[in-house]
Image: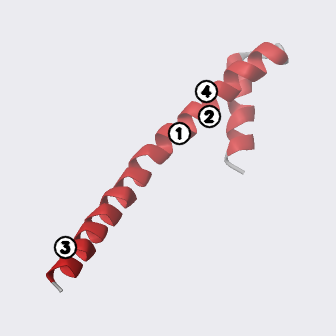
C-alpha cells in the first residue's frame, strides 16, 4: 500500500514538471522554427529577411 502512494506522488510530480517544461520551451521551439524558415525563404526566394520573417510567422502560426 505504501508503494502505491510513492508511485502516485512520483507521477504527480512528474506531471507538474512536464506541464511546466512544455510552457517554457514552447516559445523557444516556435522561435527556432520561424528563424529556420526565414533563412530558407530568404535564400530560395531572394526576398529580404524582414519580408521572409513576416511570411514565415503567418505560415507557422496558422
What percent of the width, then of the height, locates residue 23? 42, 53
Foreground label between 1 and 3:
3
Q: Nearer the viewer, mark 4 or mark 1?
A: 1
Tell how many labels: 4
Element carrying mark 1: helix
What whole-number distance in Å separates the C-alpha atoms at marks 4 and 1? Answer: 10 Å
Mark 3 to mark 4: distance in Å? 43 Å
Q: Helix, strand, or loop for circle 2? A: helix
> Which mark lies nearer to you, 3 or 4?
3
Mark 4 and mark 1 lie on one chain; the one further toward the N terminus is: 1
Pick whichever, 18 or 5, lies toward us.
5
**Rendered view: 37 above or below 14:** above
Q: Nearer the viewer, residue 28 or 3?
A: 3
**Residue 62 falls left or right of residue 35:** right
Check disc 4 and report its element: helix, strand or loop.
Answer: helix
Name the residue tied to disc 2.
33
Marker disc for residue 29:
1
The reply to whether discs 2 and 1 touch (Cβ–Cβ < 8 Å) is yes
Q: Where in the figure is residue 29, as x and y percent of width and height?
A: 53, 39
Question: Which residue appears at 14% of the width and 81% of the height?
Answer: 2
Q: Which mark is residue 35?
A: 4
Q: Which mark is residue 6?
A: 3
- Alpha carbon separation for disc pair 2 and 4: 6 Å
Amino acid at each position: 500500500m505504501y508503494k502505491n502512494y510513492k508511485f502516485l506522488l512520483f507521477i504527480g510530480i512528474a506531471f507538474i514538471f512536464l506541464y511546466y517544461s512544455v510552457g517554457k520551451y514552447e516559445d523557444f521551439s516556435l522561435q527556432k522554427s520561424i528563424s529556420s524558415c526565414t533563412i530558407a525563404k530568404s535564400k530560395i526566394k531572394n526576398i529580404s529577411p524582414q519580408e521572409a520573417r513576416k511570411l514565415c510567422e503567418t505560415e507557422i502560426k496558422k
